[in-house]
Image (cartoon, grey):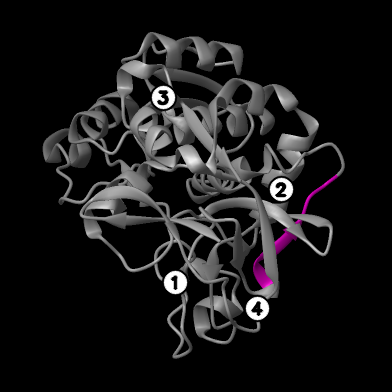
């Protein structure tokens, strides 16, 4: 079968053996390219890439919650499976285990989330990044009526706009790119102005974090979602003087706010406009090299690039 792996820092389509093991075998239907996948290319990991996955097992459609966990440590027992620290092998599919940029992939049974009616597998790779956005808003205790600013108009930023609107929040978007701004407006975001109860850093840059500090009302909360390889710098004086709270947001969980992956799937099923807006490019798996090029080119107009075998 075919699989996409990083060779010398570049995406490469290889012929590999069918995946072995006892986990269910998923026939891949769609996989999204995440910004972290672009970073992982440089790591040259010996695994197949891809953690935003949907497909079928024995004809039943699923999306994949890619956090492999022990299920028994103190973190897993409270539903924070993304913080698993058990002795059993754990980690992210597509990072620690072979991922979904392939014809087939094996995943644990507990990572399979059945798709609700109305959500096709071709769009269901968006469940993973939407669950990230949903989790971030819950981590900063967002409630109806809160004013929210999302800084960064990539797929996670735009899906945070969609999640915020679903939660009944007033949400604005600040981004540098016109095509992202237009997509945000389509999803219900207003233009940035004034200060906010909650800001969401979804760009992964120090400048975006500084914007969040500046835009957050005294006593407000900042959700740190954007990933960066280097240490982040917080403007200390306004952060301290305004007594802001900075909350790290990692993946998604099954804690007090319920199973966030299931909730994200339901949101996408209820509003097909989200997938129509966020998925801008689709490629066959054989054209993975071009798909990665488009995903990494800010001038291409891409938001979410999806591949399908």
Q: Residues within 10 Å of mark 3 (few under 14, many from 20)?
A: many
**Residue found at the very far right of the displayed protein:** 117
**Circle nearer the viewer, 1 or 3:** 1
Q: Earlier in the sequence, mark 1 or mark 2?
A: 1
| Range shown magenta | 110-116
Which residue: 49% across, 9% down? 182
Cβ–Cβ below 8 Å for labels 3 and 4?
A: no
Spatial separation of the CA atoms under disc 1 and disc 2: 22 Å
Spatial separation of the CA atoms under disc 4 and disc 1: 15 Å
Residue linked to disc 1 = 91
Q: Which mark is residue 23?
A: 4
Q: Is residue 62 left or right of residue 188?
A: right
Cβ–Cβ below 8 Å for labels 2 and 3?
A: no
Residue linked to disc 2 = 263
Q: Residues within 10 Å of mark 4 (few under 14, many from 20)?
A: few
Q: Position of residue 161 (x, y in %)?
A: 54, 27
Cβ–Cβ below 8 Å for labels 1 and 2?
A: no
The verdict on residue 113 being magenta is: yes
Q: Which mark is residue 40?
A: none
Q: Earlier in the sequence, mark 1 or mark 3?
A: 1
Q: Earlier in the sequence, mark 3 or mark 4?
A: 4
Mark 1, secondary structure of its residue:
strand
Q: Residue 207: name its quadrant.
A: top left
Which residue: 60% across, 28% down? 162
Spatial separation of the CA atoms under disc 2 and disc 3: 22 Å
Q: Residues within 10 Å of mark 2 (few under 14, many from 20)?
A: some
Residue 175 in sight in this render: no
Spatial separation of the CA atoms under disc 1 and disc 3: 27 Å
The verdict on residue 130 being magenta is: no
- Answer above or below: position of 19 versus 218: below
**Circle nearer the viewer, 1 or 2:** 1
């Amino acid at each position: 079968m075919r699989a996409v792996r990083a060779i010398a820092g570049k995406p490469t389509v290889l012929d590999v053996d069918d995946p072995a093991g006892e986990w269910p075998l998923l026939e891949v239907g769609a996989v999204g390219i995440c910004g972290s996948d672009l970073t992982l290319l440089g790591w040259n990991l010996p695994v197949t890439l891809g953690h935003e996955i949907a497909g079928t097992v024995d004809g039943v459609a699923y999306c994949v919650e890619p956090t492999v966990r022990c299920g028994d440590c103190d973190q897993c027992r409270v539903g924070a499976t993304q913080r698993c620290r058990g002795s059993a092998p754990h980690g992210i599919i597509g990072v620690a285990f072979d991922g979904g940029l392939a014809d087939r992939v094996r995943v644990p049974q507990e990572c399979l989330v059945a798709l609700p009616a109305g959500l096709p597998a071709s769009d269901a790779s968006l469940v993973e990044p939407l669950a990230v956005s949903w989790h971030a808003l819950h981590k900063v205790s967002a409630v109806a009526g809160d004013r929210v600013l999302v800084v960064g108009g990539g797929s996670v930023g735009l899906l945070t706009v969609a999640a915020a609107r679903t939660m009944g929040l007033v949400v604005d978007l600040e981004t540098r790119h016109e095509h992202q701004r237009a997509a945000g407006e389509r999803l219900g975001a207003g233009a940035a102005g004034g200060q906010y109860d909650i800001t969401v850093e979804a760009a992964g840059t120090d400048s975006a974090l500084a914007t969040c500090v500046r835009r957050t009302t005294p006593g407000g909360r900042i959700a740190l979602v954007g990933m960066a390889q280097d240490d982040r710098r917080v403007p200390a004086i306004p952060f301290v003087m305004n007594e802001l709270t900075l909350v790290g947001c990692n993946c998604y969980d099954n804690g007090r706010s319920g199973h966030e992956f299931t909730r994200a799937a339901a949101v996408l099923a209820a509003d097909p406009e989200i997938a129509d807006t966020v998925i801008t490019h689709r490629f066959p798996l054989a054209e993975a090299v071009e798909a990665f090029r488009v995903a990494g080119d800010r001038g291409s107009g891409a938001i979410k690039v999806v591949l399908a075998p």
